[in-house]
């Protein structure tokens, strides 16, 4: 675990040593603000909650999380530093997990910086802060799920653009899996798969968090989702590192 | 483990040369071609082995397999008795490796980067600071220790890579083109450094600079098309041509058609 944390610390330091951190957090906050206040009718709907805020979060993450993960492995391979990192006395899974945790910690920081929304809604009314906390937990898990997908796919190519497009595409599938466009199509053609698709949906599970429901099965879903993609990540790194 | 300690005991008693690097039938095949073809040799403590060959001959691939970055298709290698396939972490702990092109993280400072490597190598606290200071002093990086690596010249970047490889004072050093991009003074410094460390270690360096081999290596191996085609001291090799020039021997061995 020590090695995992050393890698994570180096990686997280890298975000703040480059403009990546400022740009990402700036855009994330601006986008969330604009969407929540304008499209989400935060004020005019006259409800003391963060439903409009949370409604947009998976979609903002869908766009921005792959922007973080695209460099995770693609950059290491392009610079050749992967040869340095993986010849240090460290197991491959430790490097994979360390990088993932750094990216996840970074997303957590970005999420924490949305605290003015919480203050605003508490100032204007008396929201159920338990529901808000549960929503934040869900948002963090969605970020983790997208990060694990993006991290694995970033090991596929040396090209960051390819890594980005692949990650957005695959995350999009898991985001819309419960939407009528997918489920209607599947229920006409393969009813069994419609149910499977709905259960694999990241947004569907996230919605129950935003309603204040923290169900064990959802936690297990996210944990196994992330675990699966990180396992895949390790396999891809092993297979592609020297290409 | 038992077998290893036996080897260690007998070697202390009989004092034969300790083969810190043992390469046994090492091969690497990629789709369509064989990069390294059944290469076997040992490197003893005190030896500095110059690893020569044309581009694409399999030098870097061999070194990557020694360092545990690539898995051999056949054969194996032992670093201080640790099999790179069976016990990769132990092998990597006993070795310092400078990958081709001396890659480093550009946004980190020299100090930040070396501290990162030292942490991964298991050092902490005062010992970590000592190790980093020592490596910085050996490679004369003190003047730039707080600069981001991306702002450094090619020569400094190469020395940062070298510092990283030396940091834990490993028994085995594998350096892929350690003097590439250095100016003549820096080349001289690195060669002096290698020569000073040589008695305690087994060192493999790959290079295209044949004068470097004569200056610092006790032994030279030339590989071409993945096979070892010559293994001798630099002086013996040079003696194979009337001109007594390694250049001429290198060309004759690796490119016989053109030389003739």
Image (spheres, rainbow, N blue to C red):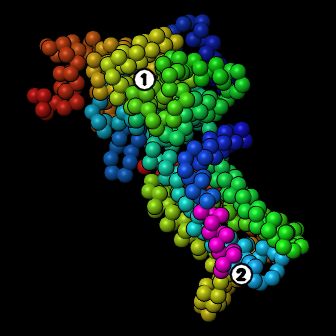
Which stretch is magenta?
Answer: A27-39
User: In what element is the residue under mark 1?
Assistant: strand
Label 2 packing within 10 angstroms: few (<14), some (14-19), many (20+) = some
> For the image shown, how many numbered marks are present on the structure?
2
Q: Judge by depth and name the residue closer to the eye, B54 or B5.
A: B54
Residue A170, image x and y in percent?
56, 70
Image quadrant where residue B86 sits: top right
Please say if A123 is above or below A39. Answer: above
In three-dimensional space, the C-alpha distance between marks 2 and 1, rounded to whole angstroms, equals 67 Å
- Specify the quadrant that holds the C terminus of chain B: top left
Give residue A12's mark: none
Residue A39, image x and y in percent?
65, 80
Residue B17 in the magenta stretch? The answer is no
Q: Is residue B253 left or right of residue A196?
A: left
Q: Judge by depth and name the residue closer to the eye, A25 or B88.
A: A25
Image quadrant where residue A35 sits: bottom right
Residue at the (70%, 21%) spot, across then down? B126
Q: Is residue A83 left or right of residue A88?
A: left
Residue at the (62%, 49%) spot, across then down? A99
Read off the chain for label 2.
A
Read off the chain for label 1.
B
Q: Which residue is mark 1?
A: B204
Q: Which residue is mark 2?
A: A41
Q: Residue furthest left?
A: B260
Label 1 packing within 10 angstroms: few (<14), some (14-19), many (20+) = many
């Amino acid at each position: 675990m020590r090695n995992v944390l050393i890698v994570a610390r180096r990686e997280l330091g890298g975000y703040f040593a480059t403009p990546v951190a400022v740009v990402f957090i700036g855009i994330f906050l601006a986008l969330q603000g604009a969407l929540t206040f304008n499209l989400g009718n935060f004020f005019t709907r006259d409800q003391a909650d963060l439903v409009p805020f949370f409604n947009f979060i998976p979609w903002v993450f869908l766009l921005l999380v792959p922007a973080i993960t695209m460099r995770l492995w693609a950059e290491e391979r392009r610079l050749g530093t992967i040869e340095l990192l993986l010849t240090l006395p460290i197991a491959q899974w430790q490097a994979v997990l360390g990088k993932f945790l750094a990216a996840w910690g970074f997303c957590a920081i970005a999420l924490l910086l949305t605290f003015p929304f919480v203050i605003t809604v508490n100032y204007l009314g008396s929201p159920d802060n338990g529901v808000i906390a549960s929503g934040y937990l869900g948002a963090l898990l969605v970020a983790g799920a997208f990060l694990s997908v993006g991290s694995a796919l970033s090991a596929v190519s040396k090209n960051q653009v390819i890594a980005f497009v692949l990650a957005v595409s695959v995350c999009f599938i898991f985001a819309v899996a419960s939407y009528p466009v997918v489920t209607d199509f599947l229920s006409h053609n393969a009813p069994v798969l419609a149910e499977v698709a709905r259960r694999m949906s990241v947004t569907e599970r996230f919605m129950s968090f935003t309603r204040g429901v923290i169900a064990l099965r959802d936690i297990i879903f996210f944990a196994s989702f992330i675990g699966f993609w990180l396992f895949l990540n390790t396999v891809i790194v092993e297979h592609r590192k020297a290409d | 483990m038992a077998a290893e300690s036996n080897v260690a005991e007998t070697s202390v008693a009989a004092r034969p040369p300790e083969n810190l690097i043992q390469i046994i039938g090492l091969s690497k095949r990629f789709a369509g071609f064989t990069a390294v073809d059944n290469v076997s040799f040992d490197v003893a403590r005190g030896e500095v082995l110059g690893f020569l060959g044309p581009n694409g001959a399999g030098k870097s691939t061999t070194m990557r397999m020694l360092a545990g970055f690539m898995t051999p298709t056949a054969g194996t290698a032992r670093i201080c008795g640790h099999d790179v396939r069976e016990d990769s972490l132990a092998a990597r702990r006993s070795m310092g490796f400078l990958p081709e092109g001396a890659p480093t993280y550009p946004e980190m400072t020299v100090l930040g980067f070396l501290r990162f490597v030292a942490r991964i190598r298991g050092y902490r606290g005062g010992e970590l600071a000592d190790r980093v200071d020592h490596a910085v002093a050996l490679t004369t990086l003190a003047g730039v220790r707080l600069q981001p690596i991306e702002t450094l010249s090619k020569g400094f970047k190469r020395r940062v890579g070298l510092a990283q490889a030396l940091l834990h004072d490993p028994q085995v050093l594998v350096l892929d083109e350690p003097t590439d991009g250095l100016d003549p003074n820096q080349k001289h410094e690195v060669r002096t450094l290698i020569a000073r460390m040589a008695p305690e270690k087994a060192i493999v360096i790959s290079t295209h600079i044949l004068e470097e081999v004569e200056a610092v290596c006790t032994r030279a191996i030339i590989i071409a098309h993945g096979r070892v085609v010559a293994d001798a001291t630099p002086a013996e090799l040079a003696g194979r041509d009337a001109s007594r020039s390694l250049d001429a021997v290198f060309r004759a061995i690796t490119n016989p058609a053109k030389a003739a």
